[in-house]
Image: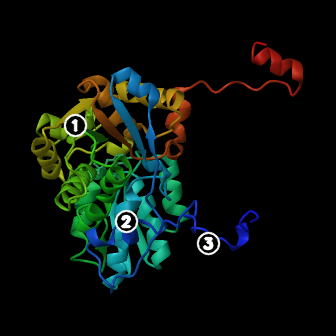
Amino acid sequence: MGEPNARSEARPSPEPPLRRWRGVLEEYRSFLPVSEATPTVSLQEGATPLLPARRLSERVGAEVWLKIEGANPTGSFKDRGMTVAISKAAEAGTEIVVCASTGNTSASAAAYAAQAGMRCVVLIPEGHIALGKLAQALVHGATVVQIQGNFDTALAIVRDLPGRAPVTIVNSINPDRIAGQMTGAFEIVDVLGDAPEIHCLPVGNAGNITAYWRGYCEYKAAGLATRLPRMFGFQAAGAAPIVEGRRVEEPETIATAIRIGNPASWYGATAASSESGGRIEAVTDEEILEAYLWLAREESVYCEAASAASVAGLLKFGVPGGSSVVCVLTGNGMKDPDLAVGQVSVPASVPAETKSVLDAIGA
Ligand code: F0G
C-alpha cells in the first residue's frame, strides 16, 4: 500500500482565518431593540481590540486590558450606539437627525446619517471641540451649528427641537444609543470568557457607563457571564458634577470630550457605581495628560485625552492586587492634533543634508 492520496482524503474544512464581521447590530441582534423591519445602517463598527497592557499591569499590580474604541470606523465608541439609533430612525422614516456634541457624537452621527441618506444637524460648543471632530462632521456633510455656549446648553436646545421641527434626537437620551453601546460589554465578555472584576471608563454625559453596566447585567442574566464588574467612572476635576453632587455651570477641562456640567444620564452613572460596588471619582487635567502621554509611550496607544481619564483614574485610585481590569479608551488621539502638539516640542527644521540630520539626532 502506498501513501494515502492526500487529494482524495476528506479534509476537514478549515475555519477561514478571518470571518466577515457584520457590525454590532447584526452580531448582537438578539440583545438589541431591532426587528425584521429594521434596516441595518452599519459601517461594520465594533470588534475593537482588547489589548493586554503589559506595562500598565506591572505598574498597578493587576491584569489590565485596554479596549481600543478609537478603532471604530469614525474613531470613537459612539459608532456602537449610532448604528442602532440611525437604523431605528431609518425604520421610522426619519429624514433629519440632530444632536448636541462635544465632537465625537457629531462625527459619528454625520457619518451614519450620510450612509442612511439623512440630513444631520449638530450643535457644538464654539471653541471647545477638537479640530479632527469638527472636520469629520463637516466632511461627512453635516450642518454644523456652533453655539455660543457649552455642551449642556446645546443639549437643552436640542431637547427643545422635536416639538418645533421634524427631527429625531440621536444623543444618548435616545435609548437606542444606550442599547447599541451595551455591545462594548458583550465583546469584552466574549473575548475574556467572563466579565472583568473592574471596569474603568471616563464619564461625561454618562451614557457609556450606563450602557456598559446594562450590557454586563444583560449578559449575566442570559447566562453568558458569571459575574459583574465593579464600575469605576472618572470625570475631569473641572467638570465633575457627579463627584461633587451638583451641576457645574462652567465646566472646564483640556479633555473637551467630557467638558460637561450636567450629564443627561446622571442617574444611570450613580446607579452603575452604587449597584456594582464601584466609584465615580475625579482626575485632574495634569493626571489626564500624564496618562495620555504614558499610554502613547509605554503601551503604544494614541487615545484622546478624555479617554486617558480611565487610566488616570486607575493609576490614581488603584485596584486590589491581581484584579482583572478593563479600561475603555473611548476615542482616537488623532482627533485632537492641537492637544497633542501642545504636549510635545515640535522640532525646528534642519538643512536637507546627512550631516545636519546626524547633528539633530545627536549621533
Ligand atoms: N470619551 C470620549 C472620547 C467622548 O467623546 C465622550 C463623550 C466620553 C468619553 C464620555 O462618554 O458622555 O457617554 O459619558 N462624548 C460626547 C460627545 C458627549 O458629544 O461626543 P459619556
Density class for disc 3 (Cα within 10 Å; few <14, some 14-19, many ≥20) is few
Is ligand 1 less than 8 Å from the beta carbon at label 2?
A: no
The residue to which callout 3 is attached is 10
Give the total number of marks visible in the rendering. Answer: 3
* Pointers 3 and 1 in contact (C-beta within 8 Å): no
The residue to which callout 1 is attached is 240
Q: Secondary structure at mark 3?
A: loop
Q: Is residue 49 positioned above or below 284 on the image?
A: below
Q: Residue at position x 39%, y 72% from top?
A: 26
Tell me residue 54's x, y (percent): 45, 29
Residues 357 and 68: in front is 68
The tag on residue 82 is 2
Density class for disc 2 (Cα within 10 Å; few <14, some 14-19, many ≥20) is many
Q: CA distance from mark 2 to mark 3?
A: 45 Å
Q: Nearer the viewer, mark 2 or mark 1?
A: 2
Q: Residue at position x 30%, y 41% from top?
A: 201
Q: Nearer the viewer, mark 3 or mark 1?
A: 3
Q: Nearer the viewer, mark 2 or mark 3?
A: 3
Residues 184 and 73: in front is 184
- Tell me which amino acid carries mark 3: Ala
Q: Is residue 27 visible?
A: yes
Q: CA distance from mark 3 to mark 1?
A: 63 Å
- Tell me which amino acid carries mark 2: Met
